[in-house]
Protein backbone atom coordinates (compact mmCIF):
# COMPACT_ATOMS: atom_id res chain seq x y z
CA UNK A 1 0.00 0.00 0.00
CA UNK A 2 1.40 3.39 -0.99
CA UNK A 3 1.95 5.97 1.71
CA UNK A 4 -0.03 9.19 1.45
CA UNK A 5 1.94 12.28 0.40
CA UNK A 6 2.94 14.58 3.26
CA UNK A 7 0.67 17.39 2.04
CA UNK A 8 -2.30 15.01 2.04
CA UNK A 9 -1.50 13.86 5.58
CA UNK A 10 -1.27 17.45 6.78
CA UNK A 11 -4.67 18.27 5.25
CA UNK A 12 -6.15 15.19 6.90
CA UNK A 13 -4.80 16.30 10.28
CA UNK A 14 -6.27 19.75 9.86
CA UNK A 15 -9.60 18.27 8.82
CA UNK A 16 -9.65 15.98 11.85
CA UNK A 17 -9.16 18.98 14.14
CA UNK A 18 -11.99 20.95 12.54
CA UNK A 19 -14.50 22.24 15.06
CA UNK A 20 -18.03 21.00 14.36
CA UNK A 21 -20.03 22.15 17.37
CA UNK A 22 -21.05 21.22 20.88
CA UNK A 23 -24.27 19.83 22.28
CA UNK A 24 -24.79 21.35 25.70
CA UNK A 25 -27.19 21.94 28.56
CA UNK A 26 -27.98 25.54 29.48
CA UNK A 27 -28.30 26.28 33.18
CA UNK A 28 -29.97 29.56 34.10
CA UNK A 29 -28.89 31.05 37.44
CA UNK A 30 -31.82 33.44 37.12
CA UNK A 31 -35.35 32.07 36.79
CA UNK A 32 -36.34 35.36 35.19
CA UNK A 33 -33.72 34.84 32.47
CA UNK A 34 -34.97 31.28 31.96
CA UNK A 35 -38.56 32.41 31.46
CA UNK A 36 -37.48 35.25 29.19
CA UNK A 37 -35.50 32.84 27.00
CA UNK A 38 -38.43 30.44 26.74
CA UNK A 39 -40.62 33.36 25.72
CA UNK A 40 -38.06 34.35 23.07
CA UNK A 41 -38.06 30.79 21.70
CA UNK A 42 -41.85 30.82 21.57
CA UNK A 43 -41.85 34.14 19.69
CA UNK A 44 -39.13 33.04 17.28
CA UNK A 45 -40.93 29.76 16.54
CA UNK A 46 -44.15 31.66 15.86
CA UNK A 47 -42.24 34.02 13.56
CA UNK A 48 -40.93 31.05 11.56
CA UNK A 49 -44.48 29.74 11.10
CA UNK A 50 -45.71 33.21 10.13
CA UNK A 51 -42.93 33.63 7.57
CA UNK A 52 -43.62 30.14 6.23
CA UNK A 53 -47.20 31.13 5.44
CA UNK A 54 -46.23 34.50 3.94
CA UNK A 55 -43.47 33.34 1.59
CA UNK A 56 -45.80 31.41 -0.77
CA UNK A 57 -47.96 34.56 -0.95
CA UNK A 58 -45.05 36.38 -2.56
CA UNK A 59 -43.88 38.32 0.48
CA UNK A 60 -40.19 39.10 0.11
CA UNK A 61 -37.40 38.59 2.61
CA UNK A 62 -36.62 42.32 2.81
CA UNK A 63 -40.27 43.18 3.40
CA UNK A 64 -40.71 40.63 6.16
CA UNK A 65 -37.51 41.29 8.11
CA UNK A 66 -37.39 45.09 8.17
CA UNK A 67 -37.67 46.83 11.53
CA UNK A 68 -41.20 48.07 10.90
CA UNK A 69 -42.19 44.80 9.24
CA UNK A 70 -44.46 42.09 10.65
CA UNK A 71 -41.81 39.81 12.16
CA UNK A 72 -40.22 42.54 14.25
CA UNK A 73 -43.44 44.24 15.31
CA UNK A 74 -45.68 41.22 15.86
CA UNK A 75 -43.11 38.99 17.55
CA UNK A 76 -40.83 41.61 19.15
CA UNK A 77 -37.70 40.42 17.36
CA UNK A 78 -34.73 42.38 16.10
CA UNK A 79 -34.03 42.35 12.36
CA UNK A 80 -31.30 39.72 12.69
CA UNK A 81 -33.62 37.25 14.42
CA UNK A 82 -36.33 38.11 11.89
CA UNK A 83 -34.02 37.34 8.98
CA UNK A 84 -33.02 34.01 10.52
CA UNK A 85 -36.68 33.11 11.05
CA UNK A 86 -37.27 33.70 7.34
CA UNK A 87 -34.31 31.50 6.40
CA UNK A 88 -35.62 28.71 8.63
CA UNK A 89 -39.07 29.03 7.08
CA UNK A 90 -37.61 28.98 3.58
CA UNK A 91 -35.63 25.83 4.40
CA UNK A 92 -38.80 24.03 5.56
CA UNK A 93 -40.65 25.22 2.46
CA UNK A 94 -37.87 24.09 0.12
CA UNK A 95 -37.66 20.71 1.86
CA UNK A 96 -41.40 20.10 1.46
CA UNK A 97 -41.25 20.97 -2.23
CA UNK A 98 -38.22 18.74 -2.82
CA UNK A 99 -40.08 15.81 -1.27
CA UNK A 100 -43.11 16.50 -3.45
CA UNK A 101 -45.29 17.36 -0.45
CA UNK A 102 -48.01 19.97 -0.31
CA UNK A 103 -46.44 22.86 1.67
CA UNK A 104 -49.86 23.68 3.11
CA UNK A 105 -49.89 20.32 4.90
CA UNK A 106 -46.59 20.77 6.74
CA UNK A 107 -47.08 20.37 10.49
CA UNK A 108 -44.73 22.33 12.72
CA UNK A 109 -43.98 20.23 15.76
CA UNK A 110 -44.09 16.96 13.86
CA UNK A 111 -46.90 15.19 12.04
CA UNK A 112 -46.52 12.01 14.09
CA UNK A 113 -47.06 13.82 17.39
CA UNK A 114 -49.91 15.80 15.88
CA UNK A 115 -51.66 12.62 14.75
CA UNK A 116 -51.21 11.09 18.20
CA UNK A 117 -52.84 14.11 19.80
CA UNK A 118 -55.73 13.97 17.33
CA UNK A 119 -56.44 10.35 18.24
CA UNK A 120 -57.28 11.38 21.83
CA UNK A 121 -56.43 7.91 23.09
CA UNK A 122 -54.36 9.10 26.04
CA UNK A 123 -55.22 10.71 29.34
CA UNK A 124 -53.53 11.77 32.54
CA UNK A 125 -49.74 11.72 32.73
CA UNK A 126 -49.11 10.19 29.24
CA UNK A 127 -51.27 12.88 27.65
CA UNK A 128 -49.52 15.67 29.54
CA UNK A 129 -46.15 14.26 28.47
CA UNK A 130 -47.23 14.12 24.83
CA UNK A 131 -48.56 17.68 24.94
CA UNK A 132 -45.33 18.90 26.53
CA UNK A 133 -43.25 17.24 23.82
CA UNK A 134 -45.51 18.76 21.16
CA UNK A 135 -45.13 22.25 22.63
CA UNK A 136 -41.36 21.87 22.94
CA UNK A 137 -41.01 20.88 19.30
CA UNK A 138 -43.44 23.50 18.06
CA UNK A 139 -42.32 26.39 20.27
CA UNK A 140 -38.76 25.47 21.27
CA UNK A 141 -36.79 26.81 18.30
CA UNK A 142 -34.14 29.52 18.43
CA UNK A 143 -31.62 30.03 15.67
CA UNK A 144 -29.11 32.77 14.99
CA UNK A 145 -26.26 33.00 12.50
CA UNK A 146 -22.95 34.64 13.22
CA UNK A 147 -21.60 37.48 11.10
CA UNK A 148 -17.86 37.82 10.60
CA UNK A 149 -18.20 41.52 9.79
CA UNK A 150 -19.90 42.03 13.18
CA UNK A 151 -17.29 40.10 15.14
CA UNK A 152 -19.41 36.97 15.54
CA UNK A 153 -22.95 36.31 16.65
CA UNK A 154 -24.64 39.38 18.13
CA UNK A 155 -27.71 37.48 19.32
CA UNK A 156 -26.14 34.38 20.86
CA UNK A 157 -22.71 35.27 22.22
CA UNK A 158 -20.37 32.90 24.06
CA UNK A 159 -18.38 34.41 26.93
CA UNK A 160 -15.82 33.10 29.38
CA UNK A 161 -16.40 34.40 32.90
CA UNK A 162 -14.43 33.17 35.93
CA UNK A 163 -13.23 30.21 33.87
CA UNK A 164 -16.79 29.14 33.01
CA UNK A 165 -18.37 29.18 29.57
CA UNK A 166 -21.56 31.21 29.41
CA UNK A 167 -24.07 32.13 26.74
CA UNK A 168 -25.37 35.68 26.47
CA UNK A 169 -28.78 35.67 24.80
CA UNK A 170 -30.17 38.76 23.12
CA UNK A 171 -33.88 38.71 23.93
CA UNK A 172 -34.70 40.66 20.79
CA UNK A 173 -35.64 43.88 22.56
CA UNK A 174 -32.23 45.10 23.68
CA UNK A 175 -32.23 43.10 26.92
CA UNK A 176 -30.09 40.04 27.62
CA UNK A 177 -30.36 36.73 29.45
CA UNK A 178 -27.36 34.70 30.62
CA UNK A 179 -26.91 30.95 30.97
CA UNK A 180 -24.10 28.64 32.04
CA UNK A 181 -23.05 26.23 29.28
CA UNK A 182 -22.62 22.73 30.70
CA UNK A 183 -21.16 20.00 28.50
CA UNK A 184 -18.69 17.14 28.64
CA UNK A 185 -18.14 17.21 24.89
CA UNK A 186 -14.50 16.73 23.79
CA UNK A 187 -14.79 19.87 21.65
CA UNK A 188 -15.30 22.03 24.73
CA UNK A 189 -11.65 23.00 25.10
CA UNK A 190 -11.49 24.00 21.44
CA UNK A 191 -14.63 26.08 21.88
CA UNK A 192 -13.26 27.87 24.94
CA UNK A 193 -10.06 28.55 23.03
CA UNK A 194 -12.01 30.16 20.21
CA UNK A 195 -13.90 32.32 22.69
CA UNK A 196 -10.63 33.48 24.27
CA UNK A 197 -9.33 34.43 20.81
CA UNK A 198 -12.08 37.03 20.44
CA UNK A 199 -12.28 38.19 24.05
CA UNK A 200 -11.11 41.74 23.21
CA UNK A 201 -14.05 42.07 20.82
CA UNK A 202 -16.48 40.51 23.29
CA UNK A 203 -15.68 42.81 26.17
CA UNK A 204 -16.07 45.92 24.02
CA UNK A 205 -19.67 45.04 23.22
CA UNK A 206 -22.54 46.17 25.50
CA UNK A 207 -23.47 43.61 28.12
Image (cartoon, rainbow, N blue to C red):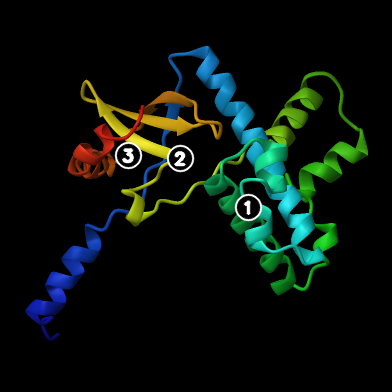
Q: In what quadrant of the picture does the N terminus appear? A: bottom left
Left or right of 16 on screen, residue 95? right
For the point 59% across and 20% down, the residue is 35
Q: Is disc 2 placed on a helix, strand or loop? A: loop
Badge 3, how many Cα within 10 Å: few under 14, some, many 20+? Answer: few
Circle 2 sits on which residue? 155
Circle 3 sits on which residue? 185
For the point 41% across and 42% down, the residue is 154
Going from N to C along the chain, the mark reached first, 3 or 1, is 1
Q: Is disc 3 placed on a helix, strand or loop? A: loop
- Residue 14 sits above or below residue 137 on the image: below
Q: Which residue lies furthest to the left in this view?
A: 6
Disc 1 from disc 2: Cα separation: 15 Å
Q: In what quadrant of the picture does the C terminus appear? A: top left
Across and down, in percent, residue 31 comes to 52, 13
Across and down, in percent, residue 68 comes to 67, 46
- Residue 105 sits above or below residue 28 on the image: below
Quarter of the view holding residue 56: bottom right
For the point 60% across and 27% down, the residue is 38
Amino acid sequence: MKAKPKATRERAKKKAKAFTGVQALLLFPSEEDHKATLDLMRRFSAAVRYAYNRLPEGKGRDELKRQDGPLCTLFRLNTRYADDAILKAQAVLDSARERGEDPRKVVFGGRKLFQQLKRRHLSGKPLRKLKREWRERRQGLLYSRGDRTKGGNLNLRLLVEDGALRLRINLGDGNYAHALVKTGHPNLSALVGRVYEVLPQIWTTPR
